[in-house]
């Protein structure tokens, strides 16, 4: 199974060498120039030539120490020769990994041979020394890839009996290797990972799959591969030990654990648990480690390590919209306000509000302070009241804005309100909330101004089974709210002499919303999602 490897160092004429240029664009337009020759170092220039599959040149470059250290010139010829010696087996291994098991690699430095079997490097070091303080030592790597080997037999065997694993235990689509496929090491490693993931998803957390040892038939240019699988027993979840956090009660972390003792093991449940704990604003990082063995009840213990997030956050942002113009925002957030993972966020927004009197803002000179819309808001979250799955949410907001625009259109809005609600987390995907909402405001248009007041009882249900909050590829999201409103008595008013004054009240009404979305990956990697 050993490929034929040859190496040589050769001495070329130094006369007529071109001075080395030190300037380069970081390798964006080809190889960077080697360092400038000097008496203290021995720079070299390495080139690659691939015969057969020339697409493997990149593979050789990535595996080559000579290439990686070309900007770090060796101090002497002995170090340069050592680098060349180290590259020979590494380059052959790199080509084997791509399925070229008859590959040959030749390294030349000015024509002086460097044999893998001989340790006499005197001629090679003398040849390299001839370039000292004159020019970069030329190093040439030539590879003959030979034919691409293919898979002949692919077997998945039980480690103990060496019998084939039945298709009902491991579907062939999981392995994704077939006779005739290229015998590439990355494909074999990917198949091994898929086998492990499959068994773990079926509730076998201790599955072991030995790295395959390919049997290479050089004459037939084929490879036989066998995976030895030890599934281990099916298991459930055992005790969960929590380490950290340091600045708030670990009971809050435990309230975001939804694993029940004996619940069937699955990697998805472990990942859902990690995401659930990470949703606590005061949590910085979450690491979940699985035990190496099962407990006496046949369950797998878990060890959760939680770190604290920095308490304070201050930020600002600005933007420009072709519809609304410029806007700016400043905010402050504390993620552990009273030492119980409480989050307080204060925010202020400034933006251009559309005019409602028929005029337009055409230049900076037309600007008035009343053209600015303003909004201040505050939100407070107290997770896990008393260590339970109940969270307290409080929000408040005050705003001055203009809605609509154009001649005789739109109105000015001034309002303030707030919401206080309790949210119960059924599990990591489902939650329900109930609260109280109050709002008081005034709207003013070209004719009159109206006071209004509202009191609501918002009810909400949220379900989110997606795999990623920002870029989901699978799962469903449903958000439903129902809010009955009771109107306060109000009175219309005007600040304009002679304008009509109308009295009345705010009517009762109910507002319901439903938003739903589903995500389905088209390809296996989730790059295309419906």
Image (cartoon, rainbow, N blue to C red):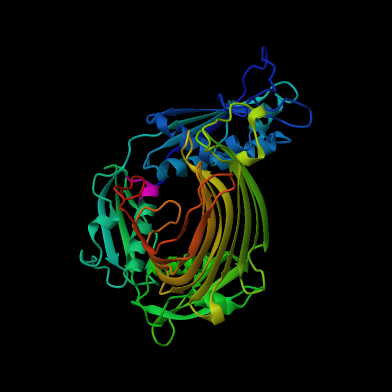
Residue at 42% of width from left, 77% of height from top?
259
**Residue at the extreme top of the image, as rendered:** 16
Q: Position of residue 488 (x, y in %)?
A: 48, 65
Q: Position of residue 305 (x, y in %)?
A: 57, 71
Residue 480 appears in the rendering: no
Residue 63 appears in the rendering: yes
Asked if residue 217 is positioned above or below residue 195 in the image, the reply reads above
**Residue at the extreme front of the image, as rendered:** 498
Q: Position of residue 521 (x, y in %)?
A: 31, 50
Asked if residue 376 is positioned above or below residue 166 in the image, the reply reads above
For this view, does 529 lie left or right of residue 91? Answer: left
**Residue at the extreme bottom of the image, as rendered:** 296
Q: Is residue 193 magenta?
A: no
State the predominant SS element of the stretch in magenta. Answer: helix
Residue situated in front as seen by the camera: 26 or 187: 26
Residue situated in front as seen by the camera: 270 or 344: 344
Q: How many marks?
A: 0
Q: Residues in magenta?
A: 183-187
Asked if residue 249 is positioned above or below residue 418 in the image, the reply reads below
Q: Position of residue 199 (x, y in %)?
A: 33, 67
For this view, does 443 lie left or right of residue 457? Answer: right
Quarter residue 251 falls in: bottom right
Asked if residue 243 is positioned above or below residue 408 in the image, the reply reads below
Residue at 29% of width from left, 56% of height from top?
175
């Amino acid at each position: 199974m050993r490929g034929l490897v040859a190496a040589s160092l050769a001495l070329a004429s130094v006369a007529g060498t071109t001075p080395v240029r030190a300037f380069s664009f970081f390798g964006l337009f080809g190889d960077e120039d080697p360092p400038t020759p000097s008496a203290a170092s021995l720079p070299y220039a390495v080139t690659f030539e691939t015969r057969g599959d020339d697409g493997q040149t990149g593979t050789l470059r990535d595996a080559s120490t000579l290439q990686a250290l070309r900007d770090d010139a060796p101090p002497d010829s002995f170090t340069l020769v050592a680098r060349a010696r180290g590259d020979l087996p590494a380059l052959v291994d790199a080509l084997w990994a791509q399925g070229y098991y008859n590959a040959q690699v030749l390294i030349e430095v000015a024509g002086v041979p460097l044999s893998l079997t001989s340790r006499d490097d005197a001629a090679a070091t003398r040849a390299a020394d001839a370039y000292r303080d004159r020019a970069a030592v030329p190093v040439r790597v030539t590879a003959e890839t030979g034919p691409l080997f293919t898979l002949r037999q692919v077997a998945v065997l039980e480690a103990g009996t060496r019998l084939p694993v039945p298709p009902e235990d491991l579907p062939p689509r999981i392995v994704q290797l077939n006779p005739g496929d290229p015998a590439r090491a990355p494909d074999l490693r990917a198949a091994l990972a898929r086998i492990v993931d499959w068994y773990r998803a079926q509730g076998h957390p201790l599955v072991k799959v030995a790295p395959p040892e390919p049997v290479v038939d050089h004459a037939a240019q084929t490879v036989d591969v066998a995976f030895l699988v030890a599934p281990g027993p099916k298991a459930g979840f055992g005790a969960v030990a929590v380490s950290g956090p340091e600045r708030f009660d670990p009971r809050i972390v435990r309230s975001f654990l939804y694993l029940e003792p004996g619940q069937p093991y699955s990697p998805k449940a472990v990942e859902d648990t990690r995401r659930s704990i990470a949703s606590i604003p005061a949590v910085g990082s979450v690491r979940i480690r699985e035990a190496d063995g099962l407990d006496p009840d046949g369950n797998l213990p878990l060890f959760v390590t939680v770190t604290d997030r920095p308490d304070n956050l201050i930020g600002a942002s600005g933007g420009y919209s072709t519809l609304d113009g410029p806007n700016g925002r400043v905010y402050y957030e504390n993620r552990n306000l009273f030492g119980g993972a409480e989050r307080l966020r204060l925010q202020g927004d400034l933006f251009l509000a559309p005019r409602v009197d028929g005029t337009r803002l055409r230049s900076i000179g037309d600007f008035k302070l009343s053209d600015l819309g303003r909004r201040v808001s505050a939100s407070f979250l107290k997770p896990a009241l008393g260590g339970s799955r109940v969270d307290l949410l409080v929000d408040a907001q005050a705003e001055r804005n203009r809605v609509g625009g154009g001649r005789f259109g739109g109105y000015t809005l001034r309002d303030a309100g707030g919401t206080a609600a309790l949210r119960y987390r059924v599990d990591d995907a489902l939650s329900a909330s109930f609260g109280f909402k109050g709002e008081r405001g005034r709207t003013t248009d070209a004719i009159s101004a109206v006071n209004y007041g509202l009191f609501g009882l918002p009810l909400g249900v949220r379900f989110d089974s997606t795999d990623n909050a920002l870029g989901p590829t699978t799962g469903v999201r449903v958000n439903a709210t129902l809010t009955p409103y009771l109107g306060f008595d109000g009175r219309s008013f005007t600040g304009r002499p002679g304008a009509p004054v109308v009295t009345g009240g705010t009517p009762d009404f109910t507002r319901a919303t439903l938003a739903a979305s589903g995500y389905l990956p088209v390809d296996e990697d989730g790059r295309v999602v419906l």
